[in-house]
Image (cartoon, helix red, strand yellow):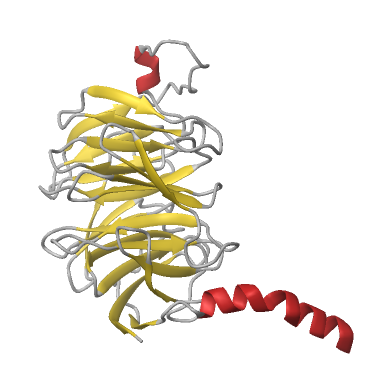
């Protein structure tokens, strides 16, 4: 690179550098070798991770043993299977308020609810069928209750279930707490209420629904009936935002942690979309990230991050921003 070219590169890079470095950095440490795996088990890329009320960690990965459970100290406990099919292509994992485990399998177009013991309680979607969003004006049919490569699931305060049906479709599907279909909203596009790869979804204590609209580089916020409220499209930086995964903390003072796959870092947001802090950078070392695809935040000071490219899980302990 010539001297002139170097100065041109530096000049063009300054706005992005300034935006990213104006964000408060969060103190954190990554716990080395937190998950203890037996010799016969290796994990694949790690899209989904969640933590229950006992502190047990559940990992949904694309290896030979898709769904694994660990205790609060990271010790391996068991693998959980799904009948004779088993899981095919893991995408995300959540637990609800009763510690039931919800696995979103993109490969079989299903969201599977399992008891804490691993018994199948509810299945949303159909392994054999997929469905696309109907054209404008076409009435809903029972087929619109199926999925085409779903990405995530979340739960409202009254137990309502929200599924981001994100790759083949571009929408959110709502069910009641018993799995009865309620409604759908969204379609492919860039307008408010439209999506391009809704990749993650969370619900706050008031019932507001937050959707990571990944390719559109924004988070959209809706009420529990799917009415558009607002969008966050200038989070952290105007060019690097790729909201890949969301988690929301419990308790009265909730915050959202968002993995930004575009720059391989994690942002801490308040419920108005303001950035409270950031952590991480690209890489393979401890405390660095390569495609952080799943995140769990049982508290504001404890994070679990699953990475697709590095095929690992990191436990992060956070301090205060400075």
Of the pair 57 and 281, the residue shown nearer to us? 281
Quick check: 222 left or right of 160? right
Task: Answer above or below: position of 272 versus 119.
Answer: below
- Where residue 138 appears, x then y in whole percent? 47, 11
Q: Quadrant of the C terminus?
A: bottom left
Confirm whether residue 25 shows in the render: yes
Quick check: 268 left or right of 80? right
Q: Quadrant of the N terminus?
A: bottom right
Confirm whether residue 1 shows in the render: no
Task: Answer above or below: position of 6 versus 177.
Answer: below
The residue depicted at 30 percent of the width and 71 percent of the height is 35
- Where residue 26 appears, x then y in whole percent? 37, 81
| Quadrant in the rendering for residue 286 | bottom left
Task: Answer above or below: position of 248 versus 144.
Answer: below
- Where residue 321 appears, x then y in whole percent? 33, 82
Number of residue marks: 0
Task: Answer above or below: position of 30 versus 97.
Answer: below
Of the pair 58 and 2, the residue shown nearer to us? 2
The residue depicted at 33 percent of the width and 58 percent of the height is 272
- Where residue 73 appears, x then y in whole percent? 19, 74
The residue depicted at 55 percent of the width and 68 percent of the height is 263
Quick check: 60 left or right of 72? right
| Quadrant in the rendering for residue 253 | bottom left
Of the pair 84 and 220, the residue shown nearer to us? 220
């Amino acid at each position: 690179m010539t001297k002139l070219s170097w100065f041109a590169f530096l000049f063009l890079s300054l706005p992005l550098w300034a935006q990213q470095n104006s964000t408060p950095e969060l103190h954190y440490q990554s716990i080395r070798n937190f998950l203890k795996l037996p010799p016969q088990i290796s994990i694949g890329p790690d899209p989904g991770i969640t933590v229950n009320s006992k502190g047990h960690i559940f990992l949904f990965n694309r290896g030979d043993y898709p769904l694994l459970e660990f205790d609060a100290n990271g010790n391996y406990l068991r693998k959980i299977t799904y009948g004779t099919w088993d899981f095919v292509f893991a995408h995300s994992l959540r637990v609800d308020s009763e510690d039931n485990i919800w696995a979103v399998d993109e490969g079989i177009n299903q969201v599977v609810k399992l008891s804490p013991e691993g018994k199948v309680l509810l299945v949303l979607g159909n392994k054999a069928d997929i469905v696309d969003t109907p054209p404008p004006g076409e009435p809903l049919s029972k087929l619109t209750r199926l999925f085409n490569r779903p990405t995530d699931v979340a739960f409202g305060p009254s137990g309502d279930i929200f599924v981001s049906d994100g790759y083949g479709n571009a929408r959110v599907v709502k069910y009641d707490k018993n799995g009865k279909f309620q409604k759908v909203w969204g379609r492919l596009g860039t307008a408010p209420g439209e999506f391009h790869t809704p990749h993650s979804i969370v619900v706050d204590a008031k019932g507001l629904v937050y959707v990571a609209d990944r390719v559109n580089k924004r988070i959209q916020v809706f009420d529990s009936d799917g009415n558009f409220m607002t969008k966050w499209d200038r989070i952290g930086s105007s060019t690097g935002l790729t909201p890949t995964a969301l988690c929301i903390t419990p308790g009265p003072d909730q915050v959202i942690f968002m993995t930004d796959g575009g720059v391989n870092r994690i942002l801490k947001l308040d419920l108005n979309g303001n950035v409270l802090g950031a952590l991480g950078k690209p890489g393979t070392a401890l405390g660095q990230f390569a495609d952080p695809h799943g995140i769990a935040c049982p508290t504001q000071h404890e994070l679990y991050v699953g990475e697709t490219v590095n095929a690992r899980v990191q436990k992060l302990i956070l301090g205060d921003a400075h």
